[in-house]
Image: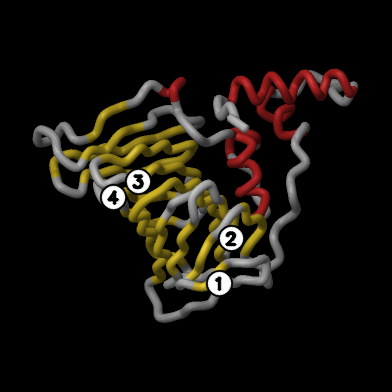
Amino acid sequence: MTQDYHSGHFLRRRLLKGFAAGIFTSLLPLTKVFAATLNLPAKLPVTQSVYRISGKAWVNGNKVDMNTRIGPNDTVKTGKNSELVFVVGDHSMLLRGESHLVIQSSANDNSSSAVISSLRLFAGKLLSASRSMGLQIHTPTATIGIRGTGVYLEAGAEKTYFCACYGDVDVSAVNDASSLLTVHSAHHDKPLYIYGHDLPGKCIHEVNRLARPNHSDDELMLVEALAGRTPPFVS
């Protein structure tokens, strides 16, 4: 079934359901009304890594089930038409199908409580929410410095699609040190393509923010809820 990921469409459907049920008795900000209509989960227990799996996924070559523990220095892969939602420490992630992600820590500690220093998304699609400062995400064409944000990426060999859903990030092109950009985003304000090859200083291109693909506000609220948080846009 095709899913519409534009937040406006999601919001309208949630609002209609909410008004029909008679649950809104005051004029709340729309994002808070939107959040109120979702049945969000509680914070995931520290003894659990996997919240949801659809299809097939592997950690270090072993097939994932609901009892699988995922931590720094693990390699996570997903099969075609699959999805894995999981938490490592206070970092929540949604990994879509045909993805290859390596989680790295600065220390030789494989426990789920260890601090993640970087993520390497070799291929695929990742929604990530963290409050960690100084975290880096690497793709074949981009390096992204995270300062406590929610982000979405689609990594390919020739280009990376990147959306700072909220927060501050520093973006640079792997093959061109002069292609640099700092983004402050309140709510999907400046999605980007980062290309592997282009003119010097021109490898980063802005994308129409209304055309952002494949991620939604309810997914962001889901992954934040699994870490016991709410996104800034509903605070």
Residue at the image point whose x is 39% and y is 68% from the top? 104
Residue at the image point whose x is 44% and y is 22% from the top? 211
Q: Are the residues flagged by discs 2 and 1 in contact, CB closer than 8 Å?
A: yes
Q: Going by the image, does 62 lie left or right of 75? A: right
In depth, the one of 211 and 228 nearer the eye is 211
Q: Secondary structure at mark 2?
A: strand
Check the image and name the residue furthest to the left. Answer: 200
Q: How is the image coloured?
A: secondary structure
Which amino acid type is shown beneath numbered disc 4? Thr
Q: Are the residues flagged by discs 3 and 1 in contact, CB closer than 8 Å?
A: no
Q: Which residue is mark 1?
A: 112
Q: Are the residues flagged by discs 2 and 4 in contact, CB closer than 8 Å?
A: no
Residue 143's tag is 4
Picture coordinates of residue 16, whole percent (x, y): 78, 18
The crowd level at tag 3 (other Cα within 10 Å; few <14, some 14-19, many 20+) is many
Q: Going by the image, does 45 lie left or right of 216? A: right
Residue 79's tag is none
Residue 87's tag is 2
Upstream in the sequence, badge 4 or badge 1? 1
Residue at the image point whose x is 21% and y is 44% from the top? 173
Picture coordinates of residue 11, whole percent (x, y): 66, 23
Upstream in the sequence, badge 3 or badge 2? 2
In depth, the one of 63 and 182 nearer the eye is 63
Which amino acid type is shown beneath numbered disc 3? Ala
Residue at the image point whose x is 19% and y is 42% from the top? 196
Check the image and name the residue furthest to the bottom. Answer: 108
Looking at the rendering, which quadrant does residue 35 occupy?
top right
How much space separates mark 4 and mark 1, taking CA atoms? Answer: 24 Å
Q: Which residue is mark 3?
A: 155
